[in-house]
């Protein structure tokens, strides 16, 4: 069904690096399937991504990073996501929380949030910020 998966269930190299299917797909809507992937690329050492497969078009319509981890001598960045219906429309939405630090900065950590809602075809970033008490950052 998906031409980017080989016989060993490994995903062929995409433009972003090597990815491996970790065995889960989700029906997001009648025309979209979410493929949960784990891998890395040239900028992020590890990541979990949701590839949004458009059934009618037969291709990946969008890639959403769900979790990432990166660090080097200049700093680090960790991101996690919470997946739930945020707006009561009975569709999966994503809350992404990122904790990062630039070691040259006086701030210990910087925390940012992005909320993505599903519009029937894609996840769209909103201007709404997440409640960090309900969705805590992973800064340790």
Image (cartoon, rainbow, N blue to C red):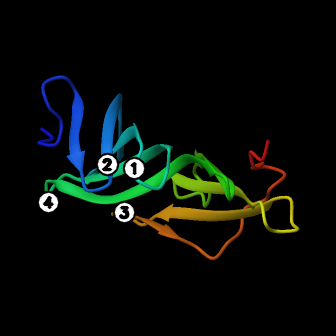
Q: Earlier in the sequence, mark 2 or mark 3?
A: 2
Q: Quadrant location of residue 105?
A: bottom right
Secondary structure beneath dot 2 equals: strand
Seen from this angle, which residue lies furthest top?
8
Q: How far apart are marks 2 and 3 (CA)?
A: 28 Å
The numbered mark at residue 120 is 3
Indicate which label's residue lies in the foreground, 2 or 4.
Answer: 2
Q: How far apart are marks 3 and 4 (CA)?
A: 14 Å
Q: Residues within 10 Å of mark 3 (few under 14, many from 20)?
A: few
Q: How far apart are marks 1 and 2 (CA)?
A: 5 Å
Q: How crowded is mark 2: few (under 14 residues within 10 Å), some or many (20 or more)?
A: some
* Residue in the picture at 25% in, 56% down: 15
* Residue in the picture at 37% in, 64% down: 122
Q: Quadrant of the N terminus?
A: top left
Q: In this view, does 5 lie above or below 115?
A: above
Question: Do we see residue 91 in this rendering?
Answer: no
Residue 127 horizontal side relative to residue 32, left or right:
right
Q: Distance between the residues labelled 2 and 4?
A: 23 Å
The numbered mark at residue 57 is 4
Q: Is residue 8 above or below residue 4?
A: above
Q: Which of marks 1 and 3 is nearer the N terminus?
A: 1
Q: How crowded is mark 1: few (under 14 residues within 10 Å), some or many (20 or more)?
A: some
Seen from this angle, which residue lies furthest bottom?
127
| Residue topped by disc 1 | 41
Q: Position of residue 72 (x, y in %)?
A: 62, 51
Q: In this view, does 121 lie above or below 82?
A: below
Residue 18 horizontal side relative to residue 131, left or right:
left
């Amino acid at each position: 069904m998906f031409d980017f998966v080989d016989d060993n269930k490994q995903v062929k190299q995409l433009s972003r690096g090597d990815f491996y299917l970790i065995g889960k797909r989700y029906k997001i809507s009648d025309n979209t399937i979410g493929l949960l992937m784990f891998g890395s690329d040239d900028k992020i050492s590890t990541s979990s991504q949701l590839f949004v497969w458009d059934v009618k078009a037969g291709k990946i319509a969008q890639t959403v990073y769900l979790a990432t981890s990166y660090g080097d001598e200049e700093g680090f960045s960790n991101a996690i996501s919470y997946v739930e219906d945020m707006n009561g429309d009975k569709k999966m939405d994503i809350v992404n929380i990122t904790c990062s630090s630039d070691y040259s900065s006086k701030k210990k950590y910087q925390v940012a949030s992005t909320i993505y809602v599903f519009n029937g075809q894609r996840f769209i970033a909103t201007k709404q910020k997440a409640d960090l008490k309900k969705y805590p950052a992973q800064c340790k």
